[in-house]
């Protein structure tokens, strides 16, 4: 077995945290994995793992070796991906996390088109409005809307989304049409809980002066689609990005409020951990999305 294969198996064992689980992933017996680990430690002249029937711990030397094995394997993969890219061919797995509605409305068709260009890519998408730790490495790319607080991440802007205040015709017939942002304080707000309520809803007048209103309501949700449906049902006023409500505005199910006031834009980003060598497949996906959303 080559040293590179030994490195790969060692990384699998550490990531699995168990020789038994690693053996399952590698398609080997527990005895075979244990034997190969002992041979690797013998070749290196140091103990990499301490293990018994229940626990497996990485020694200081093992942690050092693991980190460098990961870096070497990543570089080997990057070189292979780059050579494949030169031939117009990319392969491997990609994992992308994205907000629920934005993923469905804006990205789903684009991702399918990306796969048509790269049929050897296996793409796993996870749609979730919850906050995701990009640095955990669980995903190759994370799509995030709004302000960024993470340090040590690469952020590539995909596009802007524009917030709009909307309500149903039935709601407006019952409660009236607000003429100014300040009047929203007397209306029933539909509150998006993934953003701090202290921020309020902001609008800009014709001179560009910001007006922030604290809106109160009885319905809260961490998903924009749920809030849109509540607005269509006449429950209250929603403050949502354009991609979320454009279809309902076109159908007449919702009405845009305060057309003389502009609401702020929120940027959409593709995020990934800082790496010295970014895999070509990840680079290709991000560049494709940027081109399609900003140019195409």
Image: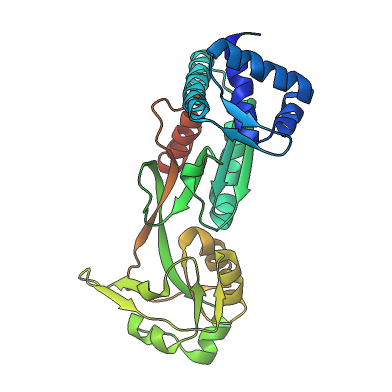
Horizontal side, residue 226 vs residue 237: left or right:
right
Q: Quadrant of the C terminus?
A: top left
| Residue in front for this viewpoint, 213 or 81 | 81
Q: Nearer the viewer, residue 283 or 72?
A: 72
Image vertical order of residue 91 relative to residue 198, above or below: above
Residue 180 appears in the rendering: no
Image position, residue 51 (x, y; %): 66, 32
Outermost residue toward the left in this view: 207
What's the residue at 22%, 72% (across, down)?
209
Image quadrant assignment for residue 50: top right
* Residue at horizontal 40 percent and vertical 48 percent from the top: 159
**Residue at the farthest top position:** 2
- The quarter of the image holding the N terminus is top right
Residue 174: image x %, image y %? 54, 91
Name the residue nearer the viewer: 81 or 276. Answer: 276
In this picture the colour scheme is: rainbow
Residue beneath the point at 37% across and 75% down = 198
Q: Is residue 55 shown above or below 1?
A: below
């Amino acid at each position: 077995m080559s040293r590179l294969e030994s490195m790969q198996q060692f990384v699998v064992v550490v990531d699995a945290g168990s020789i038994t689980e690693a053996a399952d992933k590698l398609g080997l017996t527990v005895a075979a994995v244990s034997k190969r680990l002992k041979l690797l430690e013998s070749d290196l002249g140091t103990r990499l793992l301490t293990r018994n029937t229940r626990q497996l711990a990485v020694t200081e030397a093992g942690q050092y070796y693991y980190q460098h094995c990961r870096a070497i394997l990543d570089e080997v993969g990057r070189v292979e991906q780059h050579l494949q890219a030169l031939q117009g061919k990319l392969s491997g797995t990609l994992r992308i996390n994205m907000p629920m509605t934005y993923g469905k409305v804006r990205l789903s068709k684009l991702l399918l088109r990306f796969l048509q260009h790269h049929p050897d890519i296996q793409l796993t998408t996870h749609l979730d409005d919850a906050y995701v730790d990009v640095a955990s490495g669980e995903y190759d790319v994370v799509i995030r809307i709004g302000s960024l607080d993470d340090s040590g991440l690469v952020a590539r802007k995909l596009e802007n989304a524009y917030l709009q205040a909307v309500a149903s015709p039935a709601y407006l017939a019952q409660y009236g049409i607000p003429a100014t942002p300040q009047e929203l304080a007397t209306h029933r707000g539909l509150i998006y809980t993934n953003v701090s309520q202290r921020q309020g809803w902001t609008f800009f007048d014709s001179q560009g002066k910001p007006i922030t209103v604290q809106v109160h309501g009885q319905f809260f949700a961490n998903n924009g689609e749920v809030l849109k449906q509540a607005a269509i049902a006449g429950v209250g006023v929603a403050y949502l990005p354009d991609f979320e409500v454009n279809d309902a505005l076109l159908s007449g199910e919702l009405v845009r409020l305060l057309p003389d006031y502009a609401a702020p834009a929120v940027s959409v980003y593709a995020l990934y951990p800082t790496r010295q060598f970014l895999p070509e497949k990840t680079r290709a996906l991000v560049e494709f999305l940027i081109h399609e959303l900003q140019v195409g």
